[in-house]
Amino acid sequence: MYSRELEGKTYTFGVSGKLWRDALLMYDHQTRSLWSHITGEAIQGPLKGKKLNQLAAMPQIAWKTWQDNYPNTKVLSVPFRGILREELKRDAYEDYHKSQRTGVSGTKYTDKRLRNKSLVIGIQVKDNAGKTHYRAYPLSLFFDSTLIQDTVNNVPLLIYHDKKTFATAVYNRTLAGNEIEFMPKSGYMVQDLSGRQWNLITGKAKSHEAIDIRLKRIPAVNIYWFAWARYYPDTTIYNR
């Protein structure tokens, strides 16, 4: 998810139909520049080299859970325009997900540290000097626990993934300069060592809702390893 505002201007985007490193490119209607939807960077056109501001988002979550936490949410809907409901339920990429195919160019960019189609959580973290560091968390690590607590270049992180719902959330676990340790509770809740509970949908401390104490959400994406590694070859991989 990206902000459409860049240097004081708001841009509108469409799908170009073109590929770069086996991923679709966006284009903006104002300058016709081509943008990578994975990096948010313009790779061709008048805005080449410019980068959209990435917004933190929860990659996947059940509608009921979201609605329980944000009851005033507005839903974006579009007309069916002749599309059958049965077609909307079908995954057009089901065969691709089941196969070992990685894209138009095959395995040209293969990084053998993980299997090409291993699913990972990809994150980007900036250090105090403004340098961005990349790390991948294989979803296979969340078999016994929904939580990973890690530190990337002195930035303490809380990584949450529920294998049943596929929901993912990543937070900076620093609050008021203090690093917080967590333990899992039921559902989307965690608890710190003081006994205070936190909601991982909102990042909010349950016992301090009136004060609105929240953890800072970190941008994250659920993605195939081969795709993440092609764009961020310097990424590290977390191991328990």
Image: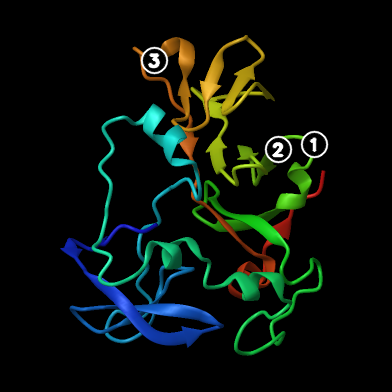
Amino acid type at circle 2 is Ile
Q: In this view, does 177 lie to the left or right of 119?
A: left
Mark 1 or 3: the one toward you: 1
Q: Using the rendered view, name the quadrant where residue 53 is placed.
A: bottom left
The x, y position of residue 9, in whole percent, is 17, 64
The x, y position of residue 77, in whole percent, is 27, 55
Q: Residue at x 34, y 12 (%)?
A: 210
Dots 1 and 3: beta carbons under 8 Å? Answer: no
Q: How far apart are marks 1 and 3 (CA)?
A: 30 Å
Instruction: Decide which of tag 1 and tag 3 comes sooner along the chain.
Output: 1
Q: Using the rendered view, name the quadrant where residue 204 is placed.
A: top left
Residue 6 visible, this orientation: no
- Give the number of the disc on residue 29: none
| Along the line of sight, the residue nearer the viewer: 152 or 191 | 191
Q: How far apart are marks 3 and 2 (CA)?
A: 25 Å
Amino acid type at circle 3 is Glu
Instruction: Decide which of tag 3 and tag 2 comes sooner along the chain.
Output: 2
The x, y position of residue 196, in whole percent, is 56, 12
Q: Is residue 239 above or below residue 36?
A: above
Q: Circle 3 sits in a helix, a strand or a loop, which is it?
A: loop
> Which residue is disc 2 drawn over?
148
> Mark 3 Cα within 10 Å, few/some/many (few <14, many 20+)?
few
> Which residue is disc 3 drawn over?
209
Q: Is residue 197 above or below residue 100?
A: above
Q: Using the rendered view, name the quadrant where residue 66 is placed.
A: top left
The x, y position of residue 135, in whole percent, is 66, 55
Q: Quadrant of the N terminus?
A: bottom left
Q: Circle 1 sits in a helix, a strand or a loop, which is it?
A: loop
Residue 45 visible, this orientation: yes
